[in-house]
Amino acid sequence: MTDETRSDELPSAPADPALSAAREGKINVAMIGLCGCWGCTLSFLDMDERIVPLLTKVTIHRSSLTDIKRITERCAIGFIEGGVANEENIETLRHFRNNCDILISVGACAVWGGVPAMRNVFELKDCLAEAYVNSPTAVPGAEPVIPCHPDIPRITTKVHPCHEVVKMDYFIPGCPPDADAIFTVLEDLIHGRPVALPRSLNHYD
């Protein structure tokens, strides 16, 4: 252990050169929720008044906050919340990977699948039957129907963490992550510092 590495920090990654040119001005940031509860987006908002000075350094592009549907400008940083549970999630994640220099898994679902991945111990057909055929909310006397339509994204056999679909550069654990952790990562990347999060973020409750 060197003087620069504290024992309570996760191993840091080197500063990314992709942000070097952009640090002189504002950088584009995108964020999206896949299969999750959007709690990580609320954690972003939990940065509260710290968001205001951040907006002098970043432009929030595609996100649930701006309602922009596609990334139309190259983004320096992309935040991904939620796991991959259907074909639309796969397309969205690949779109972010192709259009973001740095891609970050935010929260338990994006990092390892989270609560949605609990269905991975069952067959998909059994999950669908439980939800639509054997559901206690089914209308008595009505023919149970499992939804199937071209406009409905096809569900994947298993729920996957993001890194099983595309390369992810950083991981922010937590369910949801603490706003301070998201702020720390964003600030470090904006200023070209190595990202270092405390080891205490890795725990099971």
Image (spheres, helix red, strand yellow):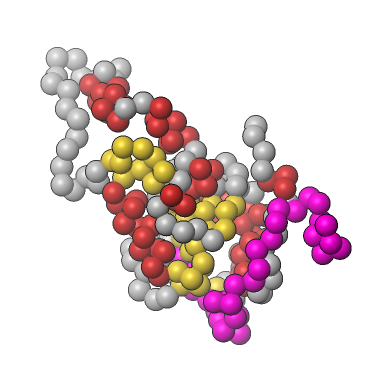
Q: Quadrant of residue 202?
A: top right
Considering the image in quadrants, where does the C terminus appear? top right
Q: Nearer the viewer, residue 123 or 152?
A: 123
**Residue 42 seen in render:** no
The spot of residue 65 in percent (x, y) is: 45, 60
Q: Farthest top residue?
A: 141
The spot of residue 107 in percent (x, y) is: 54, 47
Stretch in magenta: 1-30
Residue at 26% over, 27% down = 125
The spot of residue 118 in percent (x, y) is: 44, 31
User: Position of 105 compared to 5: left or right?
Assistant: left
Total tally of numbered discs in the picture: 0
User: Position of 7 compared to 42: left or right?
Assistant: right
Q: Is residue 88 magenta?
A: no
Residue at 30% over, 30% down = 124
Q: Farthest front residue?
A: 1
Q: Farthest right residue?
A: 3
